[in-house]
Amino acid sequence: MQRLSHARPARVAFTWNGHAIEGREGDTVGAALHAASITTLGRSRKHHRPIGLSGSFVSGSLATVDTRPNVRLDREPLAAGLTVRMQNTWPSADLNLLSLARLLPARMTYAGFEHTNLMPSGTRRFEVWEKLLRFMAGVADAPSAPNERTAPKGARVAVDTVVVAGGPAGRIAASAAAQRGERVMLISRGSTPGESAARMVGSLPELDHRVETRGGLEAFGIYRDGAFVAAAPLDGRVGALVIAPKKIVLATGRRSCPPLMPGADLPGVMDAATALSLAVDCAVAPGMQVAVIGTGAEIEVARRLRDLGVHVVATAPTQSLRRITGHNAVTGIETDRLITCDALVHAGPWRPDPALAFMAGCDGLLQLRDAPHLSGVSLAGGAGDAAEPIILGPGPRDAAFVCPCMDVTVAEILHHVRRGETDVEVLKRLTACGMGPCQGVPCWDQLAALLAEEVGGAPADYGHPTYRGPRRGLTVAQAAGLDGLVEPDR
Amino acid sequence: MSRYPKRASVVVVGGGIQGLSCAFNLALRGVGGVVVLDAGYWQGGASGRNGTLIRGGFASPEWTRFFGHSNQCWMNLAKTLGHNPMFTRRGYAMIAETPKTAAMFEGALKVHAENGVTSRRLDDAGVRSVLPAIAAERVSAAIHFRDGGVAPHHAPMKAYLAACRARGVQVHYRSKVTGIETANGCVSAVMVGDHRIDADAVLIAAGAFSTEMAKLAGVSLAGYPMRIEAMALEPTRPMIGPALALIDRLAYMHQTGRGEVVGGIEVPERPRPSLKTDLPVMTGTAKVYFEMFPALAQVRIMRHWGGMLHISPDYGPLLGPHPALRDLWITAGWSYGYSGAPGAGDLMGKAIATGQIDDRMAPFAVDRFDRGKPVRELGIVLATD
């Protein structure tokens, strides 16, 4: 893939599946691989389809780095000498016999290979079969015990207001609180607050100097009705943080969701945030020929990519997209015409990630439900805006993936719908839709949109299965390092 | 037309694994007109939220006889139901880290031998061979059950539901029981909103809601609803073979068929009726993993959830007829209900269909606390002290 002109000159050597690769200083591991035209970074759970950086489906960016399983390559900084390996392959990534599973008819693997009566349990045959399934389902090689036997120590801090995410709305809210004399902490995923927003909008509002900022932290949960916000550094070896705030502002913005149509899961299809992160931060073009679709923002995203030297071949409304072509990676799209491209960037429909707000307010005994209002928790900016509707492709969509990581197709969902099942909690349990590392975002939005389209009503009528924390996994070591910082509720 | 019938022989309140198992066994014994009603969704209660561990041996003869029977039922369940419950007999290990628990294990091994449950003491080499990933230096004693294991929630729940429906049992979810009526000192009907179902007998199998359901019938049940939590890690290839109870840490865990390590600890706290999760269980469980399975240190936590169960005064199930109301039957008070469900269904089905109370369920009679006969069990991961 093309390196853009603002690339840093210093080279950084690492290995991918045993092959030597050279990236540049400042790359993420994912970007360095993308620059080397390696776009398939993982394999889906059951059918071993190729998956890559998408910004939407986490599995596509997970690999083993040195001895750490399931590391997010789109966030992992490149360092010299890293050993990076694809997961879910056997016997090796280069000769992966497991990918033969791709030839199996989808129907055979509904709900996994599990519910078959061909291998009833209580037999020796089943024990062997189950052992094989456990190996296949495990995805990542089991890690070995590290030398370090002390958990990275967590910390607890009390503030008046905590603001989650440092985009324009977060900066405005944090500054306003600081000006009222409050102790404010702003936590952000980027190393500096507002990194990803700046890629989209250019300049950001001024941040009051009294705001305490913590970068490189991802909020993973809100507990005890908002009494605690917990956050962890991306590096699972560094201690996590529990914040005890009086008020919480969620300024987590919105993210673009891919259209629900066959091919939307292919390597090369990515959201605008991922494309801009590659191009702006790592000076890697998302593709040699890039198409940008969206619900209005496609023109601006295309302009920013072109300014950086990316070859954008087309822009179009997401609504006009009729087909995505490709077998192992995207090779083109069809709108009112055929367009050849090796990257499809989507900039809309935009939807807030509801998981943190749900955790803050949900309650229930039979089922956790959204709280009608949240006391002490407010949503700022895009996080509080209405979600734009998911766009469903016009053509036959049986082969589209509602949940690409777990290989759940539209056909599998409809198989259960035709038997009368439209309860999203039950559909989740029957298919494992949304039970991979993304934990249902955006799969459950797609599920509700599909039900509305096929059964009737509005997506909101179907609701969503319970969002379960921790949003974005923290490691066992990080969680262990937090133990004792929050007293049990006695 | 209502979706509910006007009358039933037995109305089972609760469509979790207990209710389905009892309903199936009633149908198997030729009882027609069994109706199961559940306020939530399929697998929405503790049957879809528990640790899925199955073992036959405990420290007391009462628990061991009962759960030993249930373990045998699990092993034959695919044949019994005609559907695959995916029980995998990969063994179950109980781990002691203190001399006190190690001493309790000595007594437990005797109880197992006397009550027909296969178990063996693992020596140091045994621990390293069965559990190569465990921090063996922390283990002071271990018991291994060859016939123990796990089954993923959805498989037995799917199998029981299909087997129930195939035998004519009506099962309705999202159907909240709002009243249980009595006449002449007997149960007479169950109300679902405005709809009345006349019933010859009612079985309460409502998990954490069992005390509330008993109140609808005007009677009381010992115990209270309690919340517990569990969590799952991102998948890795197999590293932990058997299911595990870490007795001194009030912890249980196993690695699922999907490669996720699932488990939890009990943290004593005030009773909180909610499915919400909290930090102490997650961090405490992580600490157990970190110390006992150091290789899990850099594995990420994928999700964490809460569930509700009904805790009885001695942590044992409440099984059998309710002493204060004729034709009201109870299977409640479960903390090891998933493991016990096939056995409970078998014995309860027999009891309701024939009136005979099996010796293995008799010690868990609903009125045992009034009679001053609680069952003392120390081999469980609940704060019994």
Image (tube, rainbow, N blue to C red):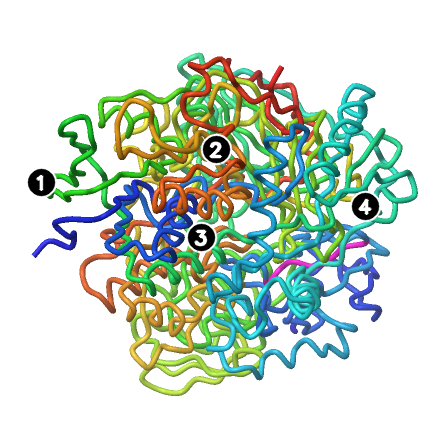
Disc 2 residue crowd, few under 14, some 14–19, many 20+, Cα 10 Å: many
Label 2 belongs to which residue? B334
Q: Earlier in the sequence, mark 2 or mark 1?
A: 1
Q: Nearer the viewer, mark 1 or mark 3?
A: 1
Q: Amino acid at mark 1?
A: Asp
Say which residue label 3 marks. A441
Side (left or right) of A15 relative to A425: right
Which subunit holds the residue at mark 3?
Answer: A
Tell me the residue at 26%/24% (across/down): B215
In the image, is residue A263 above or below residue B283?
Answer: below
- The residue where tag 4 is placed is B131
User: Which mark is nearer the camera, 3 or 2?
Assistant: 2
Disc 3 with disc 2 on a shared chain? no
Q: Amino acid at mark 4?
A: Leu
Residue A65 visible at all:
yes
- Distance from the alpha carbon under mark 2 to that under mark 4: 29 Å
